[in-house]
Image (cartoon, rainbow, N blue to C red):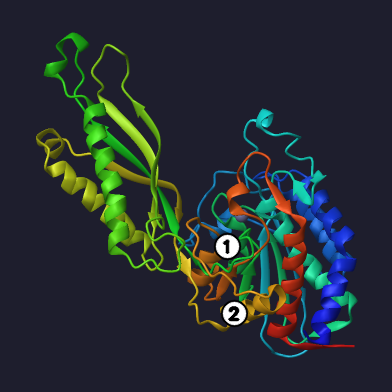
Amino acid sequence: MNNIKKHIKTAVNENRDLIVSFVKKIVRTPSLANNEGNVQRIIHKKLNSLNLNSKIIPVIFSELENHPAFNDDGFSPESRINVTATWKGRSNSKSLILNGHVDVVPTGPENLWNDSPWSGKEIDGKIFGRGSCDMKAGLSSGLFAIAILKDLGFRPNGDIIFQSVVGEESGGCGTLTNIIKGYTADAAIILEPTSLKLSPIQSGALTFRLLVHGKATHASMRWDGVSAIEKYADIHYAIIDFEKHRHDFFNTKHYKSKHRVAPINIGTIKAGQWHSTVAESVVAEGRLGVFPNESNKDAKKSFEDYVFNFAKKDPWLSNNPPEIEWFEGQFESGQTPLDDPLIKELGSIYKEICDRDPVIEGVTYGSDLRLFTNHANIPSVLFGPGDVRLAHAANEYVDIKEIMLSTEIIANMIVNWCGGSFE
Ligand SMILES: [Zn+2]
């Protein structure tokens, strides 16, 4: 390990208490979608204390709505702000975006939590609370990587752009705003909880509504009617087959399991009017996974073709075909090639600091990565502290050791990627 790396390691360790207390502070500041303002102002203030010329950028839906990647999450935009700060480099060397979202998902039933979801409590080297793992710890590690380098007298050659964004969980309006405003760089690290794996590939997800028709009649004469529930049940099991078939067909290396890349989930079913009436309709809502390399259009078509072809084999359904509607979130998949310099550089820093090979793995969930890769042409990777399985659960937490490692790796990445010197 060279001297610079040693200095960074020492400085990260010396800053442990500051980092931990900052993570706790922002976990204790609730930031559900549409209410991200308070936590953004804390981050804005912190960035300004580092002389980073932090800017508040309003997220205005009317500026986004014509963009093909815009998803209206139905929230009022008035109170929504991004915070973006640029650490100017001295030359035109490679620039780097560090991106993270402050919005968190709802807490769920609070009685499932051991403490308040906003406790920010530290127990056994872990910080608990909604948003601790997803992704206030990751965001803090990016912020403190910058703070520590500034403190060490580092002056970068390329620009470092720190982006604290809103609305990721509900469709990405924050990152899309920054893209439309023209923020760009040679690479982006999105500090999502990946347990410090490198994830340059993400699946997409499309929300659909499936309407299946039946024919209502009195229960006592049920043979004269057609139960939409029974027809739906056939389609339901066909969709499960379809999910398997799609995975056989697609090349899905770089995922932990090649059978779990683009799941299809039916989340809600509403059927029938009354117990003694044959059900006249079923409305099922679900989510269709999109493979990397597959467009939303192709994924939708393959699903529609499959359901309609299946229906054609049934005398009732062929005359009364199901209807499919696509609504709410329509999230593309996205990917950065594994041989991109971003992945190589970050991987080699990981290896040097952690003394083991990095794990490079695709993720099955949507993230802002797709916006960078598909709509801004910026190679991107998800990388950060915390286990995503804890992310939307009760008693969400993040391991402090991982926050420290993440901070160290990001600081070294800035030095290597952007270049620069220590004064
Ligand atoms: Zn997240």
Q: Is residue 116 above or below residue 49?
A: above
Tell whether label 1 touches label 2 (CB within 8 Å): no
Q: Nearer the viewer, mark 2 or mark 1?
A: 2
Left or right of 413 in this view: 42:
right
Q: Which residue is mark 1?
A: 176
Task: Give the class, few, some or many, for how many residues have Cα within 10 Å of label 1's Cα (few <14, many ≥20).
Answer: many
Q: Nearer the viewer, residue 343 or 46?
A: 343
Q: Quadrant of residue 87?
A: bottom right
Whether residue 69 is visible here, answered yes or no, is: yes
The picture places residue 290, in percent across and down from the top left corner, at: 39, 58
The kind of secondary structure element at disc 1 is helix
Q: Is residue 50 above or below residue 394?
A: below
Whether residue 131 is visible here, answered yes or no, is: no
Q: Amino acid at mark 1?
A: Leu
Q: Nearer the viewer, residue 179 or 399?
A: 399
Left or right of 51 in this view: 218:
left
Residue 342 disc label = 2
- Quadrant, the N terminus: bottom right
The residue lying at 56 percent from left, 61 percent from top is: 368
